[in-house]
Image: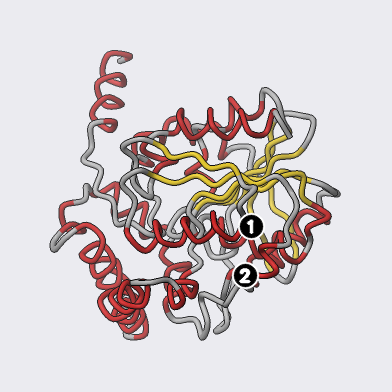
Amino acid sequence: MRDLMRRRLKEKRQLPVLLCGLFLPFGQLAAREADVDRFSASLKIAAVNGVKLHYFQNGSGVPVILIHGGLGDYREWSAQIEPFSQHYRVLDYSRRYNYPNDNSERPDHSAIVEAQDLGALLDALKLERVHLVGYSYGALTALFFATQHPERLRSLTLAEPAIMKWLLEIPGGQAELDKFMTTMWKPAGDAFRKEQPETALRITCDYFSGKGSYDKLPTEGRRLLMSDVREWKALTTSQDPFPMLDRDVVRRLKMPTLLITGEKTLNPLRMIIEELSRVMPAAERVTIPGATHDMWLEQPEACGKATLSFLARH
């Protein structure tokens, strides 16, 4: 029986990884389901800001908050729980429309709303000053929270935040934003409005990984994406999913900041991280060799090591 379980786990770890880019953190989630099972049993629920958020806590000491990306949930941090918990009190939660949360949708969903949820969650758990670690749309959420409540942050770690409107003022950025909106974002939103969630996911994957990439995903991969599809619907049909973030406000942030990027990330995200480096010249920056936007899932050890090293100094 043990040999059979080992073979099945090995097969899961060999599933093809088809990355859909920008906010899509599927990556290697299927390979970690065994790790996730033992954390899910300890999930708690906090009623905050008009919603119920599932969260997991482990460890003790200074709090570190992990904020996942789009089309993902608390499970994408499974590889980081143990190493981070050895030094910190880790809070890993699912944002309002992500598995296993079941909250009513609102037409103006955005990172501003997510930042409000985060503040309410910290209040409910009586966490005053924290380290924030955000990934993709979760990093955008963390950045909005930092601009609103800088006094509550010990440090800020941002892995390719989706500050899409900054592309409008970056040379070559307008073309990248137009391609993103017309080829994927708006068609995916239209598919959701027609109650065709699988079509929306297919459009998303086609844009980031090539035609037919969604259909090549294993059944488990599709199931994992579908478990978080309500957030993707909320974002792609939102009135303003990417609110403008004032550069001057970001420039005035004083907390220690770490910027993490993948060596092989997408062009718009590369442009945004370069611009963020210019706006925050004191920020430290780490590039994960060989990684795409899904760096935390492709190379969890390298990302975790870089972040823990940064946190140890702040």
Along the line of sight, which residue is nearer the eye, 198 or 304? 304
Q: In which quadrant of the rendered image does the N terminus lie?
A: top left
Can you say whether 15 is above or below 125 in the image? above
Residue 269 location in percent, x, y? Answer: 40, 59
Tell me which colouring the rendered structure shows. Answer: secondary structure
In this view, the residue in front, 131 or 16, is 131
Q: Is residue 171 above or below residue 81?
A: below
Q: Position of residue 238 (x, y in %)?
A: 49, 81
Name the amino acid type tagged 1.
Ala
In terms of image quadrants, where is residue 31?
top left
Front residue of 88 and 102: 88
**Secondary structure at numbered mark 2:** helix
Residue matched to label 1: 142
Q: Residue at x 48, y 75 (%)?
A: 165
Q: Which mark is residue 247?
A: 2
Residue 202, located in which quarter of the rendered image?
A: bottom left
Q: Residue at x 40, y 40 (%)?
A: 297
- Give amino acid for label 2: Arg
